[in-house]
Image: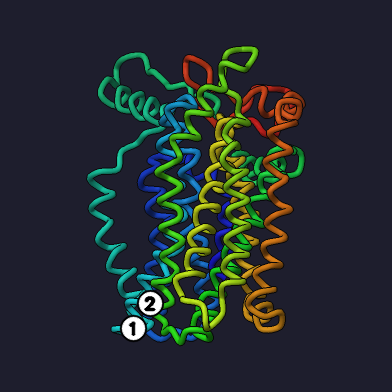
Amino acid sequence: MKHGGCSFSSTLRPSYRDFRSNAWVLWSVHHLPDIPDSMWRCSKFPNYGCLSVFGGGSSSVAINIVGGTISDVWKGAQQRSLPMALFGTTSVVGIALGPFVGGAITTHLSLRWIYWVLLISIGTLLPVFWFFLVETRGDIILAQDAKRWRKEHPDAEPRYAEAEIDQPSMIHRLKIWFKRPIKMLLTEWVVFSQTLWVSFAWGLLFLFQSSVPQTFSTNYGFNKFENSLIQLALSVGAVVATIINPIQDHQYLVSAKRSRDGHTIPEARLYSSVPGSLLFTAGLFWYGWANYPHVLWVVPMFGIGFVGFGIYSIYLAVVTYLTDSYEKYAASALSAASLGRNTFGAFLPLASPALYTNLGFQWASSLLGFIALVLTLAPVILIVKGEEIRKRSPFMKDAVFNKKGDKGESSADPQIGDEFRA
């Protein structure tokens, strides 16, 4: 249910970055809906499913907006490498940290204390956001400066920032924010293929993760908190992948020597995702066939670590490749990918109990592994055919920031269509 809310809010991702000020809009949309959510849960409100939709919709904002924001702040693929790598690390590490923190709270307190802790943390973050979050988007900063100048010089000839001139109506912008991610998903092969790849991988990850309490409780008699500790192997795998990620960055940067125009090749972002996808697949098989009561519990845990390593490689490859390919439209491209990722992450895990009960722990994980193996073809196809595909994309032709600095998420290319100008 929470991922279902994430899916809806993903289509609105570009809009969050188009308001003033981004910091406070981000905090408001990300946290304020969680306040009544947490209060209702703490007060024994019965309909948890309904509340999860609101909680998921609001909590997805932060992870949905970061890729586009990084693209705004760090111009150029080389500058973006480290911020995007760290972003990918926190995204994957958090998947296991959530069950760990929740397991610790419910073991020593109660289920409702999860939401009390959430409510307390939201209130604590309020002054942090107020004092330390500043505006980073260039066109908004210029508009704020121009507005301040007009206020300080009321008698002088007014000055306006470019973003203030011919500003479309809110209705027009809302149409763009809804349409552009969907249009890119349906018409851009790169966006469609990357979305399909990361969506299945993300869904398999959550389906697989949902099986951990079932398998370790049955085979090893682990309690709730011990199961949450096992899932930290996902985080360990992601951290290891982060440590060796500079090798991938180096391969990406040296790809400029092989290109005709001297620029880095976007498909070089996908190199590490091929072995990463294979490790993701191997981890699923390892986890399944090591899951026997007579096998020491640490053996299947290593399989979970490989899954964490692999999903980090896949997720980072998709985020960096889409950001580099659709620089100006990065938020819309990532929004489309996030729509699919959250949808698959919401519904595939529902099959976990039945799948692992009917097929058994070994063959259920093997089925996931075979699907993951087929998905490995996605980065291979783009590495081979990516340049040819990019040449046919009207969005990519208009996607690179110019030297003067574009405001982003707009279009002057008539091939894209007037209805997508913002």
Question: Residues under labels 1 and 2: Cα distance?
Answer: 6 Å
Residue 41 in sight here = yes
Residue at x-position 38% and y-position 79%: 225
Q: In this view, does 135 lie to the left or right of 47?
A: left
Frontmost residue, 115 versus 288? 288
Residue at x-position 31% and y-position 75%: 116
Check disc 1 and report its element: helix, strand or loop: helix
Quadrant assignment, res 141: top left
Frontmost residue, 41 versus 202? 202
Q: As shown in the figure, which amino acid type bears the numbered disc 1? A: Thr
Is 321 situated above or below 349?
above
Q: Position of residue 169 (x, y in %)?
A: 57, 37
Q: As shown in the figure, which amino acid type bears the numbered disc 2? A: Gly
Q: In this view, does 18 lie to the left or right of 192?
A: left
Is 116 situated above or below 57?
below
| The label number, if any, that marks residue 103 in the structure image | 2
Q: Where is residue 27 in the image (x, y as percent from the top left)?
A: 37, 52
Check disc 2 and report its element: helix, strand or loop: helix
| The label number, if any, that marks residue 79 in the structure image | none
Point out the image quarter for the N terminus: bottom right
Name the residue tied to disc 1. Answer: 107
Residue at x-position 32% and y-position 78%: 105
